[in-house]
Image (cartoon, rainbow, N blue to C red):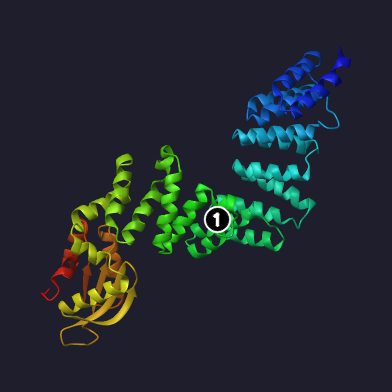
Amino acid sequence: MFFLIPGQIKKARKLLNKDEEDIAIHCLNNVLKMDKGNATANWLLSEIYRKKSQYILAQMYLYDILHFGKFTKDVNETEVRETLAYLYQKLGDFSKALNQYILLKKENKLTQDGLKRAIRVAIEGNNYQEAESLIKLALSLNIDDGEMEFFQALIHFNQSSFPSAERRLKLAVEKGYRNYEVDYIFGKIYFFSRKYQLALKHFEQLPLDYLNTAELESFIGQCFYYLKDYNATIVILEKFLEDIDKKKKKFFTNIEYILGCAYESKGNIERALEIWKNIDSYISFFGPVKEKLDFYTHVANTADLRDIILLKTPLFIDEVKKVSESMGFAIKRKLLEDEKNLEYLCSSGQSRGAFNTHFVFVTRRTHKVDISLLNEVLIKARDSRARSVLIIAPSYNEDALHFADRNAIAVHTFEVFLRKGESA
């Protein structure tokens, strides 16, 4: 009967070339009935089921090859174990995938490409100790291999050691390693380090097959938001949220929240509230959304107040100066002027002396002022030797108001902008 086996295998190969899988499987199973350990038949059957993504069934035939040990020139132990590792990796079992490479390493059968795949599997499985050991082995074979620097950068990145990850990536590039993954990791490092312009530069160098991934779209959209390009933010994040599965939306709550903030910054409060209310409908404990809804429902609940809060920064500064003057303060020195906060040293009345200095702090952040912020302001005022402190903010929590009263801090809400000209 064994003399029939070569003909059956040859027939199976021809059938596979014609995409006649079912008949080919029948032929190969006939071979295994005659010779269960036939390496070629098991390999071909494994290959068929790999293509069908039936990975466990594909593994079964590979294990039969290893069990019987009837390797051929085309089907050797190295290829079988590396394929097994790949299948375990696809199944998310990185420990068992790595174990196949470790067995090859012990038998000195691990190829250089296999060694690099083993390092990737170890990193994916968070087995950094084994990854470092394999990297050390790889460097002993080629000390100038830039990919090893890249692998170490991945480890440091996964451990949130961004400065060292950045250094390793630069070394990888210096050693000649070229891969789009480098730009991707660079971009993520700079994103998490809040260097959004640099992050965007690297993300935009990636090819289209990267650019179309959901994760990258979310990163790019957030970069534009933090760089204050709200139009681009809205276009990208609207598309991102439209494309993802509705069941997965709860995992991207922060992205949806940022989209709402982009509409808020554009002055479209109604759309922002629509987005935040949608989030609140399925995640009722998301703090930032609760604060936004509370703010626009109970604090900035009129068009006049919203107009003040959403003024362009130069116009808002002008309004603050007018309000200060209406309260009898003249600005002596600017300490800070940004999109959310303004800090000034002012004089009052006719006196311009050094001992007639008042610290004026204005914020238009939408969350309530708390004691920690008042403490920060008080420390700055004392460092500036100001004799008094004045704070203007949309709203305060109760503890902050009591703290202000005990420390003689004058506090006002944004109602003062609507009462310009009246005495404070």
Residue drawn at x 89%, y 16% is: 3
- Give the labeled residue for mark 1: 161
Q: Which quarter of the rendered picture does the N terminus lie within?
A: top right
The quarter of the picture where residue 329 lies is bottom left
Asked if residue 289 lies left or right of residue 207, the reply is: left
Asked if residue 114 lies left or right of residue 200, the reply is: right
Asked if residue 140 lies left or right of residue 248, the reply is: right
83 and 305: which is toward the camera? 305
Compared with 401, 333 (above or below) is below
Which residue type carries mark 1?
Ser
The quarter of the picture where residue 397 lies is bottom left
Please tell me whether mark 1 sits on a helix, a strand or a loop.
loop
Compared with 194, 212 (above or below) is above
Q: Position of residue 421 (x, y in %)?
A: 12, 76
Compared with 288, 75 (above or below) is above
Q: Which quarter of the rendered picture does the C terminus lie within?
A: bottom left
Look at the image and tell me whether residue 32 can be seen: yes
Tell me the crowding category of disc 1: few under 14, some 14 to 19, or many 20 or more residues within 10 angstroms, Cα based.
Answer: some
Q: Position of residue 368 (x, y in %)?
A: 25, 58
Q: Position of residue 37 (x, y in %)?
A: 79, 20
Residue drawn at x 72%, y 29% is: 47
399 and 82: which is toward the camera? 82
Residue drawn at x 22%, y 68% is: 392
Q: Farthest left residue?
A: 422
Q: Farthest right residue?
A: 3
The quarter of the picture where residue 267 lies is bottom left
